[in-house]
Image (cartoon, rainbow, N blue to C red):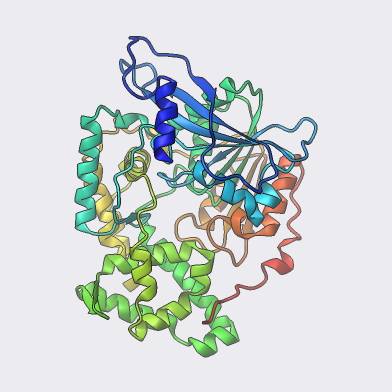
């Protein structure tokens, strides 16, 4: 599928060096769709947005962004389109739209009475150029071994040598891309829906390019002033503790798994003392730290965590081995161009390392998060703008939806931010994990109601009984 988008981009005169010495106007060209839409009832339109890589600079390179427009099945009079902002950074969405529309979240939320517009942000997914480094052991805990860090450094150098301007792949540039998309599609007004780091993109739009924005939904909010690494290891540990706390309060879970915290700490201590060979395979502290980051993000994995830890204690490392085989889900260089520009310049590696020593689980993430700082030296993303670390405020109606259990975007981030939005509303979804619109029918109902009337108070009564319990997978 990556080849299709490259061909579409080249046809539009895209990211290869242009011959004109002047910046070109953004264009949107209709084209084929990525993915299989069989069985999807909505009308689908697809195309490519082509914009300058470097606005206002000497470069004539262009970037091509794949776009998928899902038309509303029952359009509401006067409804404005929703622009979906995927997370990461370094994620993607276009190839996943068809699958999303077939699931409960898609059927109940997406393009019911508003058109929804999906696009891969510059550098990610099917965009061209794609800032992908291949299979690298990386997740939100950082590069998960020294070899991964070296791969990422080499990747940054390759991209620079190919002429990619790494200083132009960040939230502020994506905000400008969204405005170019709005204008090329002829849209007067749009709503924004961001999930995870997509909320950071939404807030960059609110700060830098708010023209035409009517309302904003932030699912699992991450704000500019939040710290990714400072306190990051402790956030993972806190999320794991929250899961185990619920297990202790659940008679069935506690009866079957009475001490998951102690079992996990014992394994962590073993791995922190040095790599261990278990069942014929060697595991390191970084591996377990990266696993816990992903497991606490995921609803199914979080519900199974007490059982998984018990298997680890018994020598069955299957879940960790499977996660290690599938932990390269990002366009890694795009992940770094954002974080090296927007996050780490405003954070202290020393403070991160000091905080990480709090407990065995937090210590698991110290080395990997420390590697972020070393790798960023190979990514010339330009001088940091201090505004990118400042809180955002806005008069726009904004709905904050946070999961009660979240190792990356904890509810405290949303609680701290909502007060700066005079028309902000907040719902902390109990007993849920990251990405609440995906896992909560009630959250989807609240989002639909908010987008129908962003100035009306949201009705949170549907949270009960749907979210009164955290239901464990005890097998």
Q: Quadrant of residue 249?
A: bottom right
Comparing 3 with 454, the one in front is 3
Q: Is residue 136 left or right of residue 454?
A: left
Q: Position of residue 284 (x, y in %)?
A: 25, 69
Q: Is residue 461 above or below residue 227?
A: below
Q: Is residue 294 visible?
A: yes
Q: Is residue 450 above or below residue 213?
A: below
Residue drawn at x 47%, y 37% as measured from the top left: 120
Comparing 180 with 353, the one in front is 180
Q: Is residue 363 left or right of residue 83?
A: left
Which residue is situated farthest in the right direction here? 77
Q: Position of residue 79 (x, y in %)?
A: 74, 33
Which residue is situated farthest in the front direction here? 38
Say how many tags the image has: 0
Q: Is residue 52 visible?
A: no
Q: Is residue 393 above or below residue 449?
A: above
Residue drawn at x 29%, y 49% as measured from the top left: 348
Q: Quadrant of residue 215?
A: top right
Comparing 72 with 154, the one in front is 72
User: Split into 4 quadrants, where in the image is the N terminus?
Assistant: top left
Residue drawn at x 53%, y 28% as measured from the top left: 31
Q: Position of residue 122 (x, y in %)?
A: 42, 33
Q: Position of residue 410 (x, y in %)?
A: 50, 57
């Amino acid at each position: 599928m990556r080849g299709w988008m490259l061909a579409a981009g080249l046809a539009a005169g895209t990211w290869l060096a242009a011959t004109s010495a002047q910046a070109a106007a953004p264009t949107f060209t209709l084209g084929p769709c990525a993915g299989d839409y069989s069985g999807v009832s909505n009308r689908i339109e697809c195309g490519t947005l082509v914009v300058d890589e470097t606005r206002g600079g000497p470069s004539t390179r262009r970037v091509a962004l794949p776009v998928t427009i899902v038309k509303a099945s029952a359009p509401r009079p006067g409804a404005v389109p929703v622009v979906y902002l995927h997370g990461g950074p370094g994620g993607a969405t276009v190839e996943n739209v068809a699958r999303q529309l077939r699931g409960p979240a898609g059927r109940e939320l997406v393009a019911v009475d508003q058109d929804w517009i999906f696009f891969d942000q510059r550098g990610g997914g099917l965009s061209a150029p794609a800032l992908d480094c291949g299979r690298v052991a990386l997740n939100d805990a950082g590069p998960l071994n020294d070899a991964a860090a070296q791969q990422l450094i080499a990747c940054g150098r390759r991209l620079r040598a190919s002429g990619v301007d790494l200083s132009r792949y960040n939230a502020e540039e994506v905000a400008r891309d969204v405005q170019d998309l709005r204008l090329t599609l002829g849209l007067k007004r749009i709503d924004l829906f961001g999930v995870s780091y997509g909320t950071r993109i939404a807030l960059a739009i609110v700060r830098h390019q708010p023209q035409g924005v009517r309302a904003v939904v932030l699912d699992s909010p991450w704000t500019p002033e939040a710290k990714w690494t400072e306190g990051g290891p402790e956030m993972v540990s806190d999320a794991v503790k929250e899961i185990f706390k619920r297990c202790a309060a659940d008679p069935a879970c506690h009866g079957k798994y009475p001490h998951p915290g102690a079992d996990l700490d014992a394994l962590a201590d073993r791995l922190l003392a040095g790599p261990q060979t278990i069942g014929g395979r060697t595991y390191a502290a970084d591996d377990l730290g990266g696993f816990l980051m992903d497991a606490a993000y995921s609803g199914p994995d979080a519900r199974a965590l007490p059982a998984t830890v018990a298997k680890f204690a018994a020598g069955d490392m299957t879940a960790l081995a499977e996660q290690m085989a599938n932990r390269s889900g990002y366009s890694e260089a795009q992940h770094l161009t954002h974080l090296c520009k927007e996050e780490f310049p405003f954070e202290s590696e020393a403070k991160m390392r000091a905080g990480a020593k709090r407990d065995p689980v937090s210590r698991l993430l110290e080395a990997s998060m420390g590697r972020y700082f070393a790798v960023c030296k190979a990514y010339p993303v330009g001088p940091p703008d201090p505004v990118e670390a400042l809180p955002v405020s806005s008069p726009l109606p904004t709905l904050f939806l946070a999961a009660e259990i979240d190792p990356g975007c904890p509810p405290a981030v949303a609680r701290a931010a909502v007060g700066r939005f005079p028309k902000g509303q907040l719902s902390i979804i109990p007993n849920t994990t990251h990405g609440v619109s995906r896992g909560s029918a009630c959250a989807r109902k609240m989002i639909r109601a908010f987008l129908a009337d962003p100035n009306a108070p949201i009705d949170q009564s549907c949270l009960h009984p749907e979210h009164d319990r955290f239901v464990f997978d005890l097998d």
